[in-house]
């Protein structure tokens, strides 16, 4: 049904800090009420209260280290059930028609990968029908229903993806992600005080920033927004200030060479010393890791002075490190490697910007800035709009702040 002039169908998503307690939930309800009173049709997606999901994950781990992933999802999805019920009550108390929706009630259908499920389909028809009648849909983020008819969860930060998926399913005009910062910044504002809020960022840059550690949006939510052309905005729950719009490249008039600096600390470095330098060795190393579903990110192979032996360094997620050590330990003789050295104290720092496509010298500025601070680079990887380096974890903040200045991103 077409909406009246000036009215819109919107999705508003509120993260954990924004729904941290009863007072915060009341403030969220007031914000939602404003949109309803302006004549808009509203679906709200909420996370669990800040800290709740962490506590639930800890409990699952305490109960059983090797727990059933289906029961893990039953436990960790429960935080969102509390917040949707409470928010619906708060709205009703203000005289606004509202109802809560769990993932399985819509349903938000997902694949069966418990703990990091992907959304496969959402039938938005019932939500649209009720929203047209003036009822606010209060939807639990982070959860869905798997093909085994069990509750699934979408991975940490997954409520962002629920919000974008609901927006796509109901044909929303906008998806507003309300959070505890004013928008997307040039670097994590909690680390770089000179970070600047970006008025606009391209989908592509946002995707790289999210996948390289800026947790302000879950990576999958950006992919989904890109694919379904969802108009996405990140803004503050607490302040009435304009946020950051995620847009197509053509919508940005003056494009900076570098838009942001990110880091991920979920990294571990593995070095295989004195590996035989012959065809098939890389396959022998990385084949078993791929078979074990281990994601390998950066790879560096050093030149071998006499053509017989080489060193191979690569990175994996820190959570996979002990598995990698075990798998490669068993294959040591086959690979012909002398020693395996594991280092979990590393971080990957990335510089991101679509302007890199048309500007030379961007990488050099990064290497120069790091060298000036005496920071050693263990590995480098690049894409068309990103350069990443692996450095010692103790240099994280120094590196990010130095790069932020070196690219002229500091707020005046
Ligand atoms: P929510 O609970 O609302 O989903 P998150 O904690 O998942 O919030 O994401 C918001 C946080 O992301 C901010 O508090 C901020 O510290 C962090 N963050 C990291 N990088 C950035 C960035 N480039 N811009 C904005 N926030 C960032
Ligand atoms: N509550 C979930 C988490 O903490 C989902 C979310 O907040 O987006 O990861
Ligand atoms: Mg989040």
Image: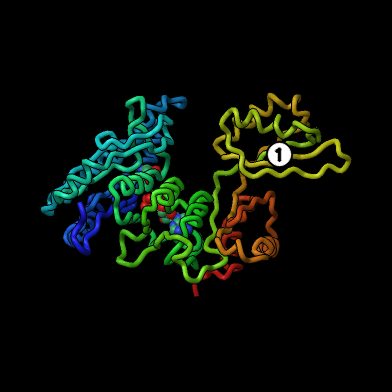
Ligand 1 under 8 Å from disc 1 Cβ: no
Percent of width and height locating residue 294 = 58, 34
409 left or right, relative to 325: left
The quarter holding residue 309 reads top right
Exactly how many numbered labels are in the figure?
Answer: 1
Percent of width and height locating residue 344 = 61, 42
Q: Secondary structure at mark 1?
A: strand
194 in relation to 158, above or below:
below
Residue with the mark numbered 1: 271
55 in relation to 373, above or below:
above
The quarter holding residue 198 reads bottom left
Residue 332 seen from this side: yes
Residue positioned most to the left: 95
57 in relation to 167, above or below:
above
Q: Residue at x 37, y 53 (%)?
A: 230
285 left or right, relative to 169: right
Residue 395 seen from this side: no
Q: Nearer the viewer, residue 180 or 155?
A: 155
Residue positioned most to the bottom: 412
Q: Quadrant of ligand 1?
A: bottom left
Percent of width and height locating residue 150 = 33, 27
Q: Residue at x 41, y 47 (%)?
A: 224
Residue positioned most to the front: 2
Q: Residue at x 31, y 49 (%)?
A: 167
Q: Residue at x 42, y 39 (%)?
A: 155
Percent of width and height locating residue 371 = 70, 61
**What's the colour scheme?**
rainbow
Q: Residues within 10 Å of mark 1 (few under 14, many from 20)?
A: some
């Amino acid at each position: 049904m077409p909406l009246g002039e000036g009215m819109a169908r919107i999705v508003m998503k509120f993260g954990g800090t924004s729904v941290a307690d009863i007072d915060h939930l009341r403030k969220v309800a007031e914000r939602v009420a404003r949109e309803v009173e302006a004549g808009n049709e509203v679906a709200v997606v909420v996370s669990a209260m800040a800290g709740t999901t962490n506590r639930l994950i800890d409990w699952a781990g305490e109960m059983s280290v090797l727990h059933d992933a289906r029961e893990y999802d039953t436990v960790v999805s429960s935080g969102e059930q509390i917040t949707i019920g409470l928010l619906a009550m708060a709205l009703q108390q203000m005289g606004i028609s509202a109802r809560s929706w769990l993932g399985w009630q819509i349903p938000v259908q997902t694949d069966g990968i418990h703990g990091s499920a992907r959304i496969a389909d959402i039938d938005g028809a019932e939500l649209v029908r009720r929203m047209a009648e003036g009822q606010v849909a209060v939807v639990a983020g982070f959860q869905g229903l798997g093909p085994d008819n069990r509750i699934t969860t979408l991975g940490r930060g997954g409520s962002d993806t629920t919000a974008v998926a609901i927006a796509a399913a109901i044909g929303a005009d906008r998806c507003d992600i309300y959070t505890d910062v004013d928008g997307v910044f040039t670097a994590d504002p909690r680390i770089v005080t000179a970070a600047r809020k970006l008025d606009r960022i391209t989908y592509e840059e946002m995707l790289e920033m999210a996948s390289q550690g800026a947790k302000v949006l879950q990576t999958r939510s950006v992919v989904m927004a890109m694919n379904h052309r969802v108009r996405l905005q990140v803004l503050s729950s607490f302040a009435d200030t304009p946020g950051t719009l995620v847009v197509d490249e053509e919508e940005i008039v003056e494009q900076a060479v570098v838009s942001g600096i990110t880091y991920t600390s979920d990294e571990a470095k593995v070095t295989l010393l004195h590996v035989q330098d012959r065809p098939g060795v890389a396959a022998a190393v990385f084949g078993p890791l791929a078979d074990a579903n281990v994601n390998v990110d950066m790879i560096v192979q050093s030149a071998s002075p006499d053509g017989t032996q080489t060193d191979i360094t690569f990175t994996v997620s820190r959570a996979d490190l002990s598995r990698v050590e075990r798998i490669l330990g068993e294959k040591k003789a086959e690979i012909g490697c002398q020693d395996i050295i594991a280092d979990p104290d590393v971080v990957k720092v990335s510089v991101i910007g679509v302007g890199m496509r048309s500007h030379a010298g961007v990488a050099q500025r990064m290497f120069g800035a790091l060298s000036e601070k005496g920071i050693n680079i263990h590995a480098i990887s690049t894409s068309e709009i990103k350069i990443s380096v692996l450095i010692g974890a103790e240099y994280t903040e120094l590196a990010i702040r130095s790069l932020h200045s070196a690219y002229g991103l500091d707020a005046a």
